Image (tube, rainbow, N blue to C red):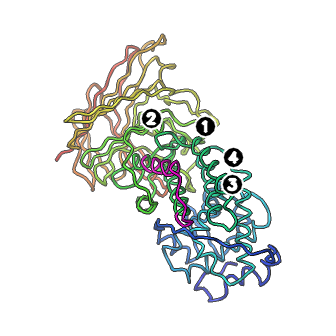
Amino acid sequence: MIAVPGADGGDVIGKLACGSLFSRLFSAKKEPLRLVAVPRDHVAGDRARGDALLAGRFTLGAKTIDLADFDFATVGADSSIAVSLQGFSWLRDLAASTGRDKGAKLAEALVGRWLLAHGTRVDEAWRPALWGERILFWTAYAPYILSSRDAGYRSALLNTLARGARHLDATADKVPPGLPRVTAWAGVVAAGLLVQGGVSRVARGEAGLGRALSGAQFQDGGLMSRSPAEQALFVDRMGLLRAAYFAAKQNLPDTLESAAAAGLAALHGVTMGDGALSSWQGGNPGDAARLTALIEGCGLRARPLRQAAGWGYQRLSALGTVVVLDGAPPPSAKVAANGCASTLAIEVSDGAQRLIVNCGGPGELPTTLSDDLVAALRTTAAHSTLVLGDTNSTAILPDGALGKGVSEVPVSRSEDNDSSRIEASHDGYLKGFGLIHQRTLILGNDGKEVRGLDKLIAKGRRKIREAAPYAIRFHLAPGVEATTTADGMGAIMRSPGAPPWNFRCRGAMLTLEESLVIDGHGDVRSTSQLVIVGEISGLGGEIAWQLRRSS
């Protein structure tokens, strides 16, 4: 049983290690290793989560684990909560809650239990991406996990860390492309910089990391998974690696510095006015405070990426009003298992108040949502855009994979003294309906008006025989209340955090329907949606709409 600091005042490490158990298991007679430097993690952790750890609880999303009964041997390494525990990023939260003297007792107890469960053999917990993350956090929080005077424990930890680095060296290139491979190679480099005798590993690690970045990151800095939540993790990994270079008194190569800064710019580009993320690719806003802490503490600086080619998220902003548009096809299955049919969807915020959102999803959080709901959240209808014929712009197959649909999304931007303008289109409805969806967005430079125009343009030989129904959906953020006008073509949107906004449409009728969104904790929140409904012929047509702040 893990002893929680303060519970009985006993020797936690002694209880877990059973005296000489570490020496017997890990051959502590080996020449002891040491860290040649300890990085400093400047990203502030979540104190509330750290307090919960000290109280014996580990919480992630909707799931809580009682640490008194916790066993690394049975938790596995596949679920989201298992990954969070196995990667040891929670050390950051523990450090935010307490100092080394008290925090080390719990940290060493849990690390000791991990060593007993996984330190003697290569198993699922040795997955390269987990080892990469583990190395980054074990080295950054070495004072919390290497304070023990138990020589067997210290030798076990450091020798296992070195074995983990060698394991990464041999397996990192076999990891699926994207953030997992980047994380694995980042661990190789960090170990080379920080663990005694690892200098020869640095050059190989840098070469491997360079290859991993080229297969994970668009030239504009965004990850090919197009996931804002993964983008935040990418910035975190690169920030920790940057700290490792500084601790080792080495210069971060320019290519890595540029990749990290570009990654931060892409992350800024999908951040809304409340400091949290916009909801794309099955993710949710996350925690604004944690994102702010990451941005402030990662050591990088960058301006928001406004025009992203590969990353795809186009950003308009003016005097507190932010509009983010998905201007790219969904990500490929190779880099994203849960891509969404969200092309040309938008999110809008006024200051810290979100107005128009997408329904989102649980992302990597443990969830109690049904599989059917999670699947429905990936559809075009769960996003603030046009749906034609109740059909996804990119097909979602029965096995969950994305099928045919959007393949090209041409985007053009322009600015003048009065406004900024984006025009984008996709071909997701071309094969089924013979129509191209084009969306134009114009944001006034005073931030008071967003004008939209959705066109369906006939193209190709296939034509609709009669007519097809369409729905242009605007999912409202929780707390935004809409009242439709008597003429059925407008609504007043009121919220606690912003002045009222007036919504008007032309060429169709406006309805108010129920909706839901997934919040930053992965929980369902009830809300509503404005829906412009009508029918379109094979010749196409257009629907104009406008959002205008009342004051």
Q: Residue furthest left?
A: 551
Which secondary structure lies at badge 3?
helix
Quadrant of residue 108 in the image?
bottom right
The image position of residue 86, as x and y in percent, is: 65, 63
Q: Which mark is residue 128?
A: 3
In space, the residues marked 3 and 4 are separated at their CA atoms by: 9 Å
> In the image, which disc is placed on residue 309?
2
Tell me which numbered mark, 2 or 3, is placed earlier along the sequence: 3
Disc number lying in front (1 or 2): 2
Q: Residue at x 44, y 35 (%)?
A: 309
Residue 31's spot in the image, x, y percent?
77, 74
Q: Is residue 308 left or right of residue 181?
A: left
Mark 3–mark 4 CB contact (< 8 Å) = no
Q: Earlier in the sequence, mark 3 or mark 4?
A: 3
Marks 4 and 1, how far apart at CA: 19 Å
In this picture, which residue range is highlighted in magenta? 246-265
Give the residue pinned by disc 1.
333
Q: Pick the residue in front: 238 or 461.
A: 238
Question: Would you say residue 255 sits in the magenta stretch?
Answer: yes
Alpha carbons under labels 1 and 3: distance apart: 20 Å
Amino acid at pointer 3: Pro
Secondary structure, mark 1, is: loop
Q: Residue at x 28, y 46 (%)?
A: 321
348 or 237: nearer the viewer? 237
Alpha carbon of mark 1 to alpha carbon of mark 2: how far?
19 Å
Q: Do the residues bearing badges 1 and 3 touch, measured as CB atoms within 8 Å?
A: no
Q: Decide if residue 492 is on the left or right side of residue 326.
A: left
Of pointers 4 and 1, the one earlier in the residue sequence: 4
- Furthest residue in direction bottom, as rendered: 9
The residue that label 4 is drawn on is: 173
Question: Sequence order check: which comes first, mark 1 or mark 2?
Answer: 2
Label 4 or label 2, whichever comes before in sequence order: 4
